[in-house]
Amino acid sequence: MARTKNPNKEPGRISQMWNVFQMTRRYDSLAIWYLLLGLLLPIIIAVGLAIVLSSDSIFGMVLYIVLGVLAGVLAFIIILGRRAERAAYSQIAGQPGAVGAVLKSSLRRGWQASEMPIAVSPRTQDAVYRAVGRGGVALIGEGPQSRTKRMLEDERRNVSRILPNVPVNFLYVGPDPDSVPLHKLAGSLRKLKPVLRKPEIVAVSSRLNSLSKGKSGLPIPKGVDPFKARAPRPR
């Protein structure tokens, strides 16, 4: 009896990579050159090392070449992942909610954020997002700086009211020349100067979540300022 294909079956790993490659090439014309460079450069280096260091040993030459091929494949996969992410973000750049998508999918451990904005302009759909991590509190404006700067200042005052010692950073994602490109947002957050430790990140995030609830008429519970809660240093 002939087997029927299951339409709900997920594609295999090779098929998934091929689909990702096709999508990336469609939106990123330079991707194929970066991929070829990442694949071939380690192989070329490995062949050169094999000739220089193991010309009298067949086993050594084969080992170098195999390692070069493996390194090339690994570099290909890494570059494909990064270029694919960039291509995907280029498709949603400028759309409402794009910053939330980045915060949901690209932030590494050590940062806490929500894909939902903490403030939205009903007229322009400009939005403000908040992330908490080792760099302190980051307020991210989605939209032109001329419209989102005031929204960020309002949120800064709200943060400083309950956490006066926690630094607040502004980032803008929008059409302005000095705005952060969408695909570089996660990297820009990681570059902020570390000022918080892990327990402090959790404490600050909890306090700010209570602040968001307070906007809906709920009382804001008073907690411990994480900067003042540090244990005294030994003399």
Image (cartoon, helix red, strand yellow):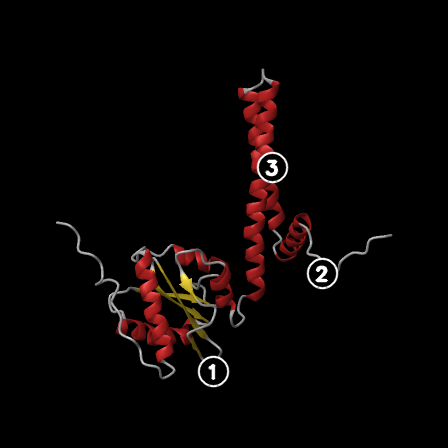
The residue labelled by disc 2 is 8
Circle 3 or circle 2, nearest the eye:
2
Q: Which mark is residue 122?
A: 1
Q: Is residue 51 above or below residue 122?
A: above
Residue 89 x/y as whole percent: 55, 61
* Residue sitting at x 45%, y 64%: 177
> Label 2 crowding class (10 Å Cα cut-off): few <14, some 14-19, many 20+?
few
Q: Residue reaching furthest top?
A: 56
Is residue 41 among what the camera can see? Answer: no
Contact check, label 3 and label 1, Cβ < 8 Å: no
Label 3: which secondary element? helix
Instruction: Choose top left, top right, bottom left or bottom right for residue 33.
Output: top right
Q: Amino acid at mark 3?
A: Leu
* Residue sitting at x 55%, y 46%: 78
Rounded to the nearest angstrom, the CA distance separating label 3 from label 1 is 51 Å
Q: Is residue 37 above or below residue 209?
A: above
Residue 225 x/y as whole percent: 25, 66
Q: Left of 152 or right of it: where is 174?
A: right
219 or 75, which is in the foreground? 219
* Residue sitting at x 60%, y 28%: 65
Q: How many marks?
A: 3
Circle 2 or circle 1, nearest the eye:
2
Q: Earlier in the sequence, mark 2 or mark 1?
A: 2
Q: Amino acid at mark 2?
A: Asn
Residue 94 x/y as whole percent: 53, 69
Q: Left of 202 or right of it: where is 186?
A: right
Label 2: which secondary element? loop
Q: Residue reaching furthest front?
A: 1
> Label 3 crowding class (10 Å Cα cut-off): few <14, some 14-19, many 20+?
some
Q: Is residue 78 above or below residue 71?
A: below
